[in-house]
Every structure is written in structure tokens, then in C-alpha cells.
Image (tube, rainbow, N blue to C red):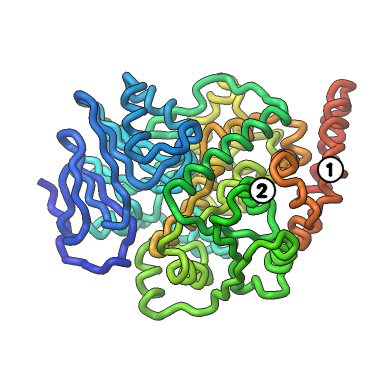
Amino acid sequence: MIKVNTTKIDNNLLYRRQYFIGPQFVDRFESWNKIKVGKNIHITAHPDLTVTTTIKGDTELALLGFVFDSKNPLYSNKQILESMLIQSNSFQDIIKLTYPLAGRWIIIYSSNYELKLLHDPSGLRQIFYSKIENELWCASQPHILASIFNIQLAENPDIHKYMKSKLFDLWERAWIGDGTAFNNIFHLIPNHFLDINLGQTIRYWPDQEIEELYLEEVAVDSKNILENLFIAALNRYQIAQAVTSGWDTRLMLSISKNYTNDIYYFVQSFPPINESSTDITVPKKIFNKLGIDFHIINANICTEEFEKIYFKNVYIAQSDHKKYQHYNYFQYFQDKLVISGNVGPLIRNMIPPNLEDINPHNLARLMNRHNQRYAINAIDVWLQQANELKNKFNVNLVKLFYWENHFGNWSSMYNSALDIATEEFAPLNCRNLILKMLAIKSCYREYHPVLLYEKIITNSWPELLDFPINPHICHNSKNTIKKSLMPPIMETLRKIGLYKYVRSVYRKTIYN
């Protein structure tokens, strides 16, 4: 039996909503829940992390976190798991059945001798894993796993240089690839599951050729999915919803039109966002005009005790100032589910999707990591495996790179730090929704990535487009109307053979 560190820790905020998964329970945390799945899976979970299980014959499913079904919005966690078991005969079936689901979750699959883990499409419920004495262990944070098994920090000088660089802080300390700062501890990135018996990660998406979809079709389908997910969340929780001047929260606000009496709308004021910021002045105008209650919360205090535990709970915090934001969540929203526009940057990312020469250096350059050897080497490893997908499934490797290597690391860091305070729900974190949005004809996505948002808002709550969107970066609704003319023009240029030339000129204007 593996020897683990058993020093007792009993504080409700310390490692809140975190977990261990392994061949035995972790007794270090006396008040944590202990759930066995199948014959060999032992879950040790903080009491505030919801764990749901169900079984059919020799097959058992366990869910860590929360999940909503866009096809059955009134289903509970338990009902969703039961429905998946009824409809499935294999783990591959289970994977397909997660496509309509949204939330922040991990699903454990145990059937006969199969033991497998997968998580939500963006990996917002993180999985870190390590093989110790030929047995696989998983945890919510790498440094906690390291402390249990006395795993040391990696001595690789490239890692230390990477973490000490100014760009590391500028990009909110986001990692690249599936490694960590510790020896033999890895991070499960999106579109992969973990085979516990093999101790390996296996890619499960893409699994078929991706066909482009038309904008109008995606707009209608996306609106329906998002509305069902709002119904699902309101059916189970009291809801708080952040609204700024940005596209993502404006989209979420439009979907909430029929439920405004049941939602606590708010924005936080914290450096550099203050009362004169457009992220406060614009939503104030919107809600004053609509006659709906709106709350501005000042986030400028944080107790010493909270701060101490806050930085213990995660190995790397995105930034130091977000502790104020999360302390406010702790004060105001512990009993609520906070709806956010997270995952929006994945859908509407502005990096050039058609990089002419895809290699580790050019991909690293997109993330301003081209002078960091660790990042280039990590991307090289990823690219060797991903290259075969381009021809096999017609997948855009730049989009895939952004999803798995950047977004799969950066976005989940925010939620992990927020676990000390509350749970956040990103309705856009639904695979069916992401795949539809990423499949829009390239001429629309590349030249006007928020046109889809505009279409959905027009279909849901068109009055919201009367107010400026991100005016501080000169991206208001008038710009939007002008840019909406670009896709059909570029499609015409493609037909007459001038597309590549005009695209190169346009990129220099937009991206440089």
C-alpha cells in the first residue's frame, strides 16, 4: 500500500471543493467525504464538492461537480447519470452522451475492468494526475498531490525561466501543454480522457470530419441550447449574473430576458475597474433603461485569513488582485450559482485561424511565448500528435491549439481559485454549442467573430444592441454593422481568386 502524508487538516475553506481520486482513500482530511466507485476507485472529496453516483449492472458512473442537460433541462445530476447509463453500452457511448451537457464536472466510468475519467469540454473542473508505484492518482491541484506523495519540483531550468518571465505574469500565469512545475505530475487537457488502468491520456475528439455550418442555423440552435441551460440552472439554484460592457455577458443577458425577476444582476468594482469604467457605466445605463435592479459591488477589501487560504488552495493564481473579486463572491454568493460568459474567448478568439506555416515557434508566437524554450518544446510534443488530425478530420489546428493548450489551462485557473467562494456556471461550456459555433463558415468567423453573438442577441433581446459593447476598445454596434458586410465580400473574393491577398492585408490591419 502506498504511504501518504497523513498530517491532519480540518478547515472548511482550505482546499474547498477539491478532491482526490486513487486506489485508496486519503485520510489526511478528516471531514471530507469518502465514496467508493467500482472495485478500485476511491474518491476523497471536500464536503462542499457535490459527488453523485449511479449504477446499472456492472457499470457505475460517478459525477464530481454539477451538470445540466440542454435536452432535458429539468433533470437533476442523478437523473442525467441514470439516463446516460440507460442509453449507453460502452464508454464511447458515454462520451457522446456528454455532448449536450454543460457545467463544471468530472465523470468517472467504471465497468468490469474499465476505469476512465473525462471532464467538461473546457476542463474547468481540472484533473491533475501522477503514476505512483504503478498506480494512478488524480487531484484537483498539482501542489496538493505533490504534498501528499512528497513529489519534488522539476529541476528543468526552462520551466523556471518560463515561470519567471514577465510574459508569464502578463498572460495571467497560464501554462502551456499538459505538464506542470512538478516531476511526473500532468494536467488533463480538453478533448482527452484518462484511462486509469493504462495510466495514459487518449484523445476522443475530433472523431469525424468537421463540416462548416451556416450562421443563421447556428444562431437559432445556439439560442435554443442556451435558453434550456438557463432553465436548468434556475430550476436548481438561486442565480447571480455578472454583466459588464463586453460581448460575452451581453449574450448571457439576452438569454435571461424571460427570467429577470429571478436573477441578481451585478458587476464588481475593483482595480482597474472603477465607477467611471465602461464595464460599470454601460450596464448601469442598460438596467436603468430596462427598469431592472442592478448592483455594483465594491471589491477592495480582503481579510488576512481569507487571503492566506486563498493562495494555499491553488498552486498558481492567475493574478494577485483577483483575491478581492473572489472575496466578494465569498461574501455575497456562497448560496448562489454565478452565471458567467466564460468560454466565450474560446468561441470568438481573434488569433488568425489560418496560420500559413504551423510549427511550434509560430504557435508559441501567437501566445507571445516564442522566446521561451519550455513553451516551444511543449507545443512541439502536442503538435506531433495533433498534426495527423488536420488531414484526417479537416480540423483547424490553430483553433485546436488555442482550445487545448491555452484556454484549457488559462480559463480553468479562474474557476479553481473561485472554489473557495462559490461555483460559477458558464452556459457556453457545452460541447454541442462549442462545436456548432466553431463550425461556422470560416469567412464569418475570421472576419467578424462576434457576428454570431449579434444574431443570437437580435433573436433574443434586440434592444440590448442599442447600447455600446466594449466601447473602450472601439468595438461598438456601429463597428459591428460595418463588419457584418465583410464576410460576404470575402466569400466573393475567394471565388475570383483574390481572397488570400485581401486576407493578408486585413490581418496586418487587425492583428498588428
**Residue underneath mark 1:** 483
**Residue underneath mark 2:** 254
| Dot 2 crowding, Cα within 10 Å, few <14, some 14–19, many 20+ | many
**Front in this rendered view, residue 309 or 394:** 309
Question: Could you say which quadrant of the image residue 59 lies in?
Answer: top left
Specify whether residue 278 is in view.
no
Question: Could you say which quadrant of the image residue 293 lies in?
Answer: bottom right
What SS does tag 1 mark? Answer: helix
Q: Residue at x 87, y 25 (%)?
A: 492
The vertical placement of 283 against 455, above or below, is: below
| Residue 299: x %, y % from top left | 54, 74
| Residue 506: x %, y % from top left | 84, 41
| Dot 1 crowding, Cα within 10 Å, few <14, some 14–19, many 20+ | some
Question: Of the residues shown, which amino acid type is indicated by label 2?
Answer: Ser
* Foreground disc of the pair 2, 1: 2
The vertical placement of 475 against 24, above or below, is: below
Q: Residue at x 66, y 48 (%)?
A: 254
Q: Residue at x 44, y 28 (%)?
A: 204
Question: Of the residues shown, which amino acid type is indicated by label 1?
Answer: Lys
- In terms of sequence position, does the residue under pointer 2 or pointer 1 come before the other? 2
What SS does tag 2 mark? Answer: helix
Q: Identify the disc placed on residue 387.
A: none
